[in-house]
Image (tube, rainbow, N blue to C red):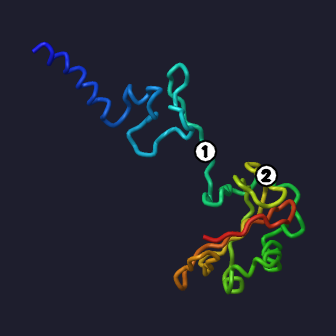
């Protein structure tokens, strides 16, 4: 009889450990740290429980908002406050469109090049994995973003898209150098 009363606190602790939300077992160094009952609401840093050494709660590290996550490219929501010196091909949206039409990758847009008016905006770009010469990871630069919507997508892989599949084409022109840094569609 006395043994059953002793087992009650142990059973209560086991039930509490399995319930959603914060528990004292979740912050044990031998367990994965869970700070909320919501799925996916974990600290962005592996092994970090979101608490300081003194045990006080801190805000998780803010990861940058990436506009095109599969390409690792962040486009600012607003134009840059001071864009700096612009290259000859990058002084205005009209000059950017003329420069885009003059280079070979404009053919990727297909018939939309002559029929659709693109969105052209001056923004600050930050790339996680740049491929263009002169662009460094996580170093922002001012660029013109050219967007064509409803462009017929072309597959260069093993599987083709269904007929008439449409998507968005994006081209990015470094405003300081006049160099095209990215072309992609999705």
Image point 88% across, 64% down: which residue? 87
Q: For mark 2, what is the residue? A: 136
Disc number for residue 22: none
Q: Position of residue 171 (x, y in %)?
A: 72, 69
The image quadrant of residue 11 is: top left
Q: Position of residue 12 (x, y in %)?
A: 24, 25
Count the numbered circles shown: 2
Q: Which mark is in front, 1 or 2?
A: 2
| Crowd rating for badge 1 (residues with CA inside 10 Å; few <14, some 14–19, many 20+) | few
In space, the residues marked 1 and 2 are separated at their CA atoms by: 18 Å
Q: Which quarter of the figure is the N terminus placed in?
A: top left
Q: Residue furthest top?
A: 2
Asked whether 169 or 129 is in front, the reply is: 129
In this picture, residue 94 sits left or right of residue 2: right
Q: Position of residue 153 (x, y in %)?
A: 61, 78
147 lies above or below 142: below
In this picture, residue 96 sits left or right of residue 110: right
24 lies above or below 66: above
Q: Residue furthest left?
A: 1
In terms of sequence position, does the residue under pointer 1 or pointer 2 come before the other? 1
The image quadrant of residue 172 is: bottom right
Image point 71% across, 86% down: which residue? 114
Q: For mark 1, what is the residue? A: 63
Image point 55% across, 25% down: which residue? 52
Q: Position of residue 76 (x, y in %)?
A: 68, 55
| Secondary structure category for the residue under label 2 | loop
In this picture, residue 118 sits left or right of residue 173: left
Q: Are marks 1 and 2 in contact (CB under 8 Å)?
A: no
Asked whether 56 or 153 is in front, the reply is: 153
Asked whether 16 or 56 is in front, the reply is: 16
């Amino acid at each position: 009889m006395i043994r059953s009363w002793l087992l009650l606190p142990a059973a209560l602790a086991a039930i509490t450990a399995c319930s959603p939300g914060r528990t004292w077992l979740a912050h044990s160094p031998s367990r994965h740290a869970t700070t909320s009952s919501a799925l996916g609401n974990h600290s962005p840093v592996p092994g970090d429980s979101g608490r300081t050494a003194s045990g006080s709660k801190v805000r998780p590290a803010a990861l940058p908002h990436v506009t095109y996550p599969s390409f690792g490219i962040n486009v600012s929501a607003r134009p840059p406050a001071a864009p700096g010196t612009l290259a000859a091909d990058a002084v205005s949206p009209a000059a950017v469109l003329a420069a885009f039409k003059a280079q070979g990758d404009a053919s990727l847009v297909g018939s939309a090049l002559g029929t659709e008016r693109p969105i052209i905006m001056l923004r600050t770009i930050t790339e996680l994995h740049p491929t263009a010469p002169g662009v460094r990871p996580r170093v922002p630069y001012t660029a013109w973003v050219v967007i064509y919507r409803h462009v017929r997508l072309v597959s260069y892989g093993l599987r083709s898209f269904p007929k008439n599949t449409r998507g968005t084409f994006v081209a990015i022109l470094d405003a300081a150098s006049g160099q095209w840094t990215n072309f992609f569609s999705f």
